Image: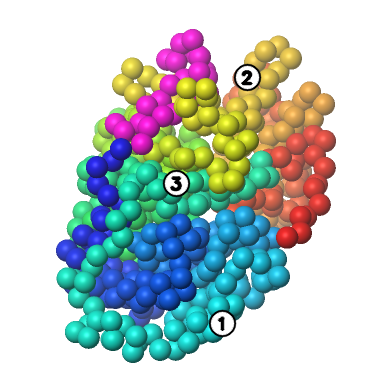
Amino acid sequence: MIKENFIKLYESSFRDNWELPCYTDWGTPVSYTYGEVANEIAKLHLLFHELGFKRGTKIALLGKNNARWCIAYMATITYGAVVVPILQDFPPADVHHIITHSEAKLLFASESLWQQLDVNHMPNLKGVLAFEEYKPLFDKTDNLLTDFQENIESIILEKYPQGYQQTDLNYTNLGNEKVMLLNYTSGTTGFSKGVMLTGNNLAGNVTFGIRTELLIRGDRILSFLPLAHAYGCAFDFLTATAVGAHVTLLGKVPSPNTLLKAFAEVKPSLILSVPLVIEKIYKNVIVPLLKKRTMRWALSVPMLDAQIYAQIRKKLVDAMGGEFKEIIIGGAAMNPEVEQFFYRIKFPFTIGYGMTECGPLISYSPWNEFKASSSGKILDIMQVRIDSDDPYTKLGEIQVYGENVMDGYYKNEEATKEVFTEDNWFKTGDLGTIDVYGNIYIRGRSKTMILTASGQNIFPEEIESRLNNMPFVHESLIVERKGKLVALVHPDMDLLKSVNQDSADNVLQLMNDNLKELNRQVANYERISRIEVMKDEFEKTPKKSIKRFQYEEGYVPKKEKRH
């Protein structure tokens, strides 16, 4: 059990960092110091008490990253309630299900998203507050919610005549063993499960960030990953708040142009990203540069290549604010070609491994210790084993045990039983190996692996990563059709139009050229029989992972459930 009490970490942080900037909405005048955040939390605690909320009451959050989202989250956990963050990209039917399944009594939501919901599908809900000034949008509390919000300033003044001060900070004494977060997964298998994370699971991640000084007091973070997802939440938000860092919330779609502008302004001390962002920079900026004749010549000259790589590295670092310690990449598999290039130029990046069920971290190494093609070293508070007779050379399922592993899935004993072994190790569903130093090497998901008639294991993700890096490919999916491998490809139509190659015949020819090149790069048993051009983008989860199951042979769409 982690010694540090998760809730008391924040009581101490608000007290110790009272005057420091805490949360800022990028591109707006909205900004809060740690003391101002503590004051807003105090108001919400009085409201929760007035509504009769007890330990364990579920409170849901639905909206984009912003300062008031962070305040509502902090107010919920420091009161002793259970927070239920919902990805804003979930369709209304899924939101209805999550709020009903979690038994949430109160919802914080952006007005635009609330207008898309039907309160009749959420019978347990007692009230809804807009993130915009926390004004009531729905009140089923005999007007307690509405009346309290109208008189909140006079109520808090009566409670704290001298104003809310550092000495007033005294959050609930709640043991780390208690469930504090329900995080609903957005998996590619079509099912959404409520991951029960305890204070210990959350403290395991946060205290790891503190011990390793991923962030320290006064550091700056640009938060652009969704905070409703475990990865961004654990480090961009929870760790940052625990140490006294300044979190700037992007609140917009993280397009490359927007990100580069925000990086230049915020100059973050640490950057957390998913592979997609890095790969876009590589594909759009670096690849065209490397294809220039003069650049190819320069890189072929001994001694000169090192100078060129150093210039490219500096250009990239400067473009991302120039002051970050490292970039931590997680959430999905990294394209091997991109990883190898960044490793070659000594770019300060590292790749970690985690899952929502571990809140999320399982392995990580600082960039200067990172081993190429690995996913970092197993955390000192976690244990990992490979379900094979030789974990160093023979592929097997990665299984984990330790402080960060969840309690189970909420109200779903069957699903919980399926993912734990008899001796209580969590089955990740990922296949890989480890080395003698504790580094994890992931090959793919056990559910997506294709076993050929000759007994060869094929990992579609590895072939897709090669194909996605080829000309005019936006995204791809490798599937099995009647025993043969087929590549489903959605082309980059904007790029095709820009070079007048967007006719159906041209697109097909370009994709067939890619097919020939791809089959030269892969093993004989991995060769693709044909490419099918997809007119529309693939259906994705809110985390932007392709819903593979919808493209499997024999898939039949399920009818939408009504709540």
Camera-side mark, 2 or 1: 1
Mark 1 and mark 3: span between their CA atoms?
33 Å
Q: Which of marks 3 and 2 is in front?
A: 3
- At a point 20% along the width and 75% down the height, the residue shown is 165
Amino acid type at mark 2:
Asn
Contact flag, marks 2 and 1 (Cβ < 8 Å): no
> Would you name the residue on which mark 2 appears?
457
| Mark drawn on residue 197 | 3
Residue 441 position, x and y percent, is: 44, 26
Going from the N terminus, do you reach mark 3 or mark 2 first?
3
Give the quadrant of residue 40: bottom left
Q: How many marks?
A: 3
Q: Would you place residue 137 above or below residue 325 in this image?
A: below
- Give the magenta range: 380-403
Q: State the CA–CA distance, disc 3 to disc 2.
A: 34 Å
Q: Is mark 3 on a helix, strand or loop?
A: strand
Residue 374, position as x, y percentages in the image: 40, 29
- Work out whether 166 lies above or below 434: below
Q: Quadrant of the N terminus?
A: top left
Q: Residue at x 74, y 43 (%)?
A: 550
Image spot of residue 404 (x, y percent)? 39, 39
Spatial CA distance of label 2 from label 1 is 61 Å
Residue behind mark 1: 142
In the image, is 428 to the left or to the right of 308?
right
Q: Are marks 3 and 2 in contact (CB under 8 Å)?
A: no
Return the residue nearer the eye: 286 or 536.
Answer: 536
Q: Along the horizontal axis of the image, is 289 left or right of 7? A: right
The answer to whether residue 400 is magenta is: yes
Look at 47% across and 74% down and name the residue there: 51
Q: Is mark 2 on a helix, strand or loop?
A: strand
